[in-house]
Image: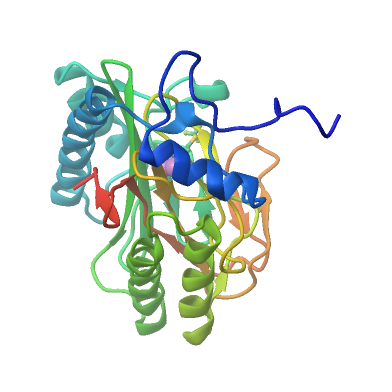
Amino acid sequence: MGMFNNRKRWRVPAGQEPTDLDRKVMAFESRGALVPKRSLIRTPEEIEGIRKSGVINTAILDLVGEKIHAGMSTLEIDELVYNYTIEHGATPACLGYEGFPKSVCTSINEVVCHGIPSAHEILKEGDIINVDCTTILDGFYADASRMFVIGETTPRKQQLVDVAKECLEIGMKAAKPFGFVGDIGNAIEQHAHKNGFSVVRDLCGHGVGVKFHDDPEVLHYGRKGTGMLLVPGMVFTIEPMINMGTWKVFIDSDDGWTVVTEDELPSAQWEHTLLMTDHGVEILTH
Ligand code: MF3
Ligand code: CO
Ligand code: CO
């Protein structure tokens, strides 16, 4: 079996000359690195498509930021997202995804992610809410989320929101071409711990662009030099979920979606869709 070379992930199509990039990745693979499949490298046309989808996605989150206020229901946020998306010729990726019933995820306070918008859920002063929106335009996916603070919140909750944003930024800086996905998680985990917060382990970032969820798996914790090799042309999310208390979470059995912290202390998350370039990541959702 060891003589066969057909377990390689990075395969140059028959009849094509390997490029410099091919040679470089194949050298990593022969040294035992987990490399992406070559099909994860997006073409310039695909990148343009994801970028356009990202423009709409960003405008949606900007709109939510303008309209969000105490007294509003999370269903009203869903309606904003649905209407803007459709009016711009796009589709909300969440709607009907594995049975998800709404167009966007709205996750308040101790809800970590995948909160379902509802007419009965009314935003109040001091709430922190994550709005996570994925847009499909011409078949291309852009996935991003932001936190919004309703009025003023406690200093510690505000710090959680700020540190979660810094974790995303620090993770983006740690993502280098021909580095590893584990470099990202390691940097995020250190920053969260330094501030006395924990990192959710059960959910991760992901490849995105031509599918909703693709390789690589982007853990927000872990060791440098582990996980998949980062190759220019890959498109993926970083989306750290940072908790005030325990990192442990559970899924609300009533709806099968809502992810909640085990100790019911608050959680915050920010997400971008990112393109790996020759220099570092480029944000496709701002
Ligand atoms: N947008 C989420 C992510 O970042 C996924 C939401 S799936 C849904 O990957 F079904 F809950 F909408
Ligand atoms: Co998302
Ligand atoms: Co995502």
In which image quadrant can residue 22 be found? Answer: top left
Point out residue 179 in the picture as x, y percentages from the top left corner: 46, 59
Report the residue at 30% width, 65% height from top: 125
Q: In the rendered view, does 226 fall on the left or right side of 233?
A: right
Q: In this view, does 151 lie above or below 42?
A: below
Instruction: Indicate the position of residue 149 as horizontal and vertical percent values.
Output: 29, 64
Instruction: Give residue 273's position: percent from left, percent from top.
Output: 33, 44
Residue 207 in sight: no
Question: At which x and y percent is residue 231?
Answer: 42, 46
* The furthest residue to the right: 1
The quadrant holding residue 69 is bottom left
What color scheme is it? Answer: rainbow
Left/right of residue 2 with respect to residue 230 in the rendered view: right
Residue nearest the viewer, comparing 72 with 194 = 194
At x 62%, y 47%, the residue is 34
Report whether residue 38 is seen.
yes
Counting every numbered tag in the picture gives 0
Q: Which of 257 and 90 is in front in this view?
A: 90
The quadrant where residue 9 appears: top right
158 or 241, which lies in front? Answer: 241
Task: Give the residue displayed 67% in from the left and 38% down from the top.
Answer: 254
Q: Which residue is drawn at 32% across and 33% down?
A: 78
In this picture, residue 219 sits left or right of residue 128: right
Left or right placement of residue 226 versus residue 279 in this view: right
- Judging depth in this view, the residue of 156 and 172 nearest the camera is 172
Is 160 placed above or below 22 here? below
Q: In which quarter of the image is the N terminus?
A: top right
